[in-house]
Image (cartoon, rainbow, N blue to C red):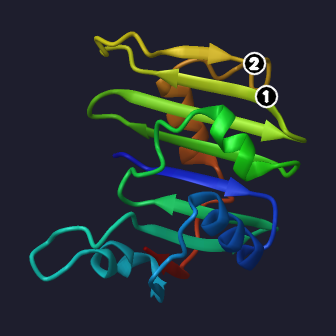
Amino acid sequence: MNPSYFRINIDLESAIKRLETWNRKSFAVRVESKYLDAVGNCIDGNGRWKGKCLFAYENDGWSVFEDLTGAYSCISASKWIEFAKADKFVLAGYNDAIPYGEMIVIENGFILKDLFDDPTGEDNLSHNVGDGHKNICDWCEIASFVDDDEIIYSDTGVILY
């Protein structure tokens, strides 16, 4: 598995507008979609991704963006502060085939957690900064956090690319 998402504690329309401003690019396509059809709506007739594809929805006051293509992974926490501003923000993802995990938690413009764990990586990019979520220290614990996160599921949403 390789789920990856980021979420921000504001309404979906505001979050999409903020993301477009932060990206310096509007999403050309917004398609209502069921969760089970999300990937199919993001690939063309030749099985290629149509672009940086997100499945977005609102759940319990959070706007959630499931990163279907991995385009939003490996962005520094300092860049995510520009997106999060003073709002609560969580980015989390993992890939159990590599293995690898990433987690960023921001609140009130401060990084509470910036964890990147790639135990097999030759580039030595792994780091764990911040006191937030002290119990999460490696990719396996990130995977458990993602798998247990009740905020990140919706039967329906919108595809953005």
- The residue closer to the viewer here, 87 or 98, is 87
Splitting the image into 4 quarters, where does residue 130 fall? Answer: top right
Secondary structure under tag 2 reads loop
Tag shown at residue 130: 2
Q: Is residue 75 above or below residue 101?
A: below
Residue shown at 9%/76% (left/top)? Answer: 46
Q: Is residue 139 above or below residue 72?
A: above
Tag shown at residue 78: none
Q: Quadrant of the C terminus?
A: bottom left
Q: Amino acid at mark 1?
A: Leu
Q: Position of residue 113 (x, y in %)?
A: 71, 27
How would you rate the neighbour count of disc 1 (Cα within 10 Å): few for under 14, some for 14-19, many for 20 or more? many
Label 1: which residue? 112
Q: Amino acid at mark 2?
A: Gly
> In the orientation shown, which residue stands out farthest toward the bottom?
32
Asked whether the beta carbons under mark 1 and mark 2 sit within 8 Å of each other, the answer is: yes
Residue shown at 61%/68% (left/top)? Answer: 20
Residue shown at 72%/37% (left/top)? Answer: 105
Q: Position of residue 45 (x, y in %)?
A: 13, 83
Residue shown at 61%/46% (left/top)? Answer: 148
Q: Position of residue 34 (x, y in %)?
A: 46, 84
Q: Is residue 118 above or below residue 58?
A: above
The answer to whether 143 appears left or right of 148 in the picture is: left
How would you rate the neighbour count of disc 2 (Cα within 10 Å): few for under 14, some for 14-19, many for 20 or more? some
Q: Position of residue 147 (x, y in %)?
A: 54, 46
Whichever of callouts 1 and 2 sits on the residue coming sooner in the sequence is: 1
